Image (tube, rainbow, N blue to C red):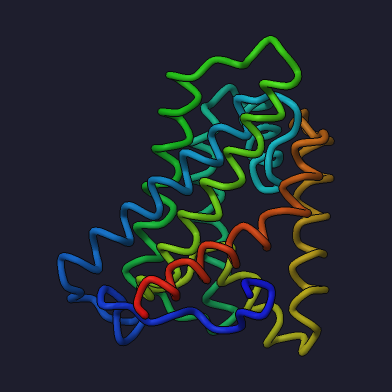
Amino acid sequence: MFTHIKNIPKLSWSSNSPRNFKPSLKTLFYLCLGLVFFGFGEGLLIVAGIGASPWNVLHQGIAESLGLSVGTIAFLVSFLVLLLWYFLDQKIGMGTIINFIIIAIMIDITILYFDKPNDFILQLLMVFVGISVVGFGTAMYLIANLGAGPRDGLMTGLQKKTNSPIALVRTSIEIVVVLLGWFLGGIVGIGTLFYALGIGSAVAIFLQLFSNSKK
């Protein structure tokens, strides 16, 4: 059952180490493909207009204040978060850099080519599709094992420094960024709630499906 999965499965395209800077083309392909899906899903949540994921609420708010695109802000925030890794003793992998470049690009592409549905049911459907796509992309890039994304590294680094439960650290980060983003004008809504409640299960489901595929 996906609810019992605790480890990231190792598949034929998994890197042996997150610090592998010479991965196979197969590993690199699946990493990039996973990040494309991740950014696309995040973009769909923004386009739906009823609440983005917590970090994108922050990106929306800053973008609104500065007049820049959400993808540009996502890139800049990721870079700033990455700078904090130095103080948290986190190690950068190839996937760490590729992560925020591809995701930022895909967010802007999705916002550009998709329109907000007029019907609330269609907006909800877009949210659920977005969460599923993010879950799929997350599972794929985690299995590639080429380094955590900037935000995941922030979470694990703070957990090690504070020795606090990882759930508490993750929740605290999400609350801070969503409140700051909302204050700056980002959209918080039912989509944000559904993302918070559903993303963990979505990732676990796809990790389980990938794990079953090797049997």
Front residue (pair 67, 8): 8
Residue positioned 57% across, 60% down in the render: 81
Q: Is residue 89 left or right of residue 180?
A: left
Q: Position of residue 41 (x, y in %)?
A: 52, 41
Residue positioned 65% across, 39% down in the render: 128
Q: Is residue 6 left or right of residue 92?
A: right
Front residue (pair 94, 66): 94
Please tell me in which quadrant of the rendered image residue 121 appears. Answer: top right
Does 185 sit above or below residue 99?
above
Q: Position of residue 139 (x, y in %)?
A: 48, 64
Residue positioned 37% across, 47% down in the render: 102
Front residue (pair 32, 176): 32
In the rendered image, which quarter contains the C terminus?
Answer: bottom left
Please tell me in which quadrant of the rendered image residue 197 appears. Answer: bottom right
Front residue (pair 155, 129): 129
Q: Position of residue 170 (x, y in %)?
A: 74, 68
Q: Residue most toward the top? A: 118
Does 154 sit above or below residue 79?
below
In the rendered image, which quarter contains the N terminus?
Answer: bottom right
Q: Position of residue 191 (x, y in %)?
A: 75, 37
Does 3 sit above or below residue 82?
below
Residue positioned 35% across, 71% down in the render: 144
